[in-house]
Image: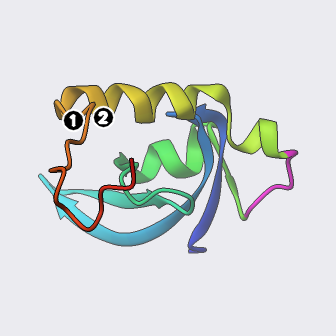
């Protein structure tokens, strides 16, 4: 089985993934996939979903940048940062990193 796959529909705004590992869960094989652009975007899908669903193409298809990294990716990243509660960074006035 090949390790490079393209999702026919963007997943969190990204389409190119790598198969990292196959695991067996409840007598069925699952595929652990990760985006080649952002390791924070990973998924676990069944063999049937990967091979037979029509949602995936073996190998990497060539797309324009806006087709392979959609605006949904930016929205996903922004929403994750807000969930973490980090939206401002404060630096003490006497810090060597204070450039204001």
The spot of residue 79 in percent (x, y) is 35, 25
Whether label 1 touches label 2, CB < 8 Å: yes
Identify which residue is drawn at 52% across, 49% down.
50
Which secondary structure class fits the magenta region best? loop
Q: Quadrant of residue 64?
A: top right
State left or right for residue 33 relative to residue 2: left
Identify the residue position indicated by label 2 in the image.
Answer: 81
Identify the residue position indicated by label 1 in the image.
Answer: 86
Label 1 vs 2, first from the N-terminus? 2
Front residue of 29 and 65: 65
Please state which of the two labelled residues, at mark 1 or mark 2, is closer to the viewer.
1
Name the disc covering residue 72, or none.
none
The spot of residue 7 in percent (x, y) is 63, 44
**Mark 1 and mark 2: Cα distance apart in space:** 6 Å
| Residue 42 counted in the magenta span | no
Front residue of 75 and 48: 75
Identify which residue is drawn at 16% across, 30% down.
85
Vertical position of residue 10 compared to residue 2: above or below:
above
User: Crowding near pointer 2: few (<14 within 10 Å), some, many (20+)?
Assistant: few
The spot of residue 96 in percent (x, y) is 26, 68
Identify which residue is drawn at 21% across, 27% down.
83
The spot of residue 9 in percent (x, y) is 65, 32
Identify which residue is drawn at 60% across, 74% down.
2
For the residue labelled by badge 1, is the local secondary structure a helix, a strand or a loop? loop
State left or right for residue 65 relative to residue 38: right
Q: Which residues are magenta?
A: 60-64
Q: Quadrant of the N terminus?
A: bottom right
Vertical position of residue 27 compared to residue 67: above or below:
below
State left or right for residue 67 relative to residue 14: right
């Amino acid at each position: 089985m090949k390790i490079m796959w393209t999702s026919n529909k963007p997943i969190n705004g990204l389409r190119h993934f790598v198969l990292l590992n196959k695991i067996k869960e409840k007598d069925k094989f699952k595929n652990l996939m990760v985006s080649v652009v952002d390791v924070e975007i990973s998924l676990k899908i069944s063999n049937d979903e990967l091979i037979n669903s029509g949602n995936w193409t073996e190998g990497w298809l060539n797309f324009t940048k806006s087709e392979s990294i959609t605006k949904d990716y930016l929205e996903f990243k922004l929403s994750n940062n807000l969930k973490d509660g980090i939206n401002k960074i404060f630096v003490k006035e006497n810090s060597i990193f204070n450039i204001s």
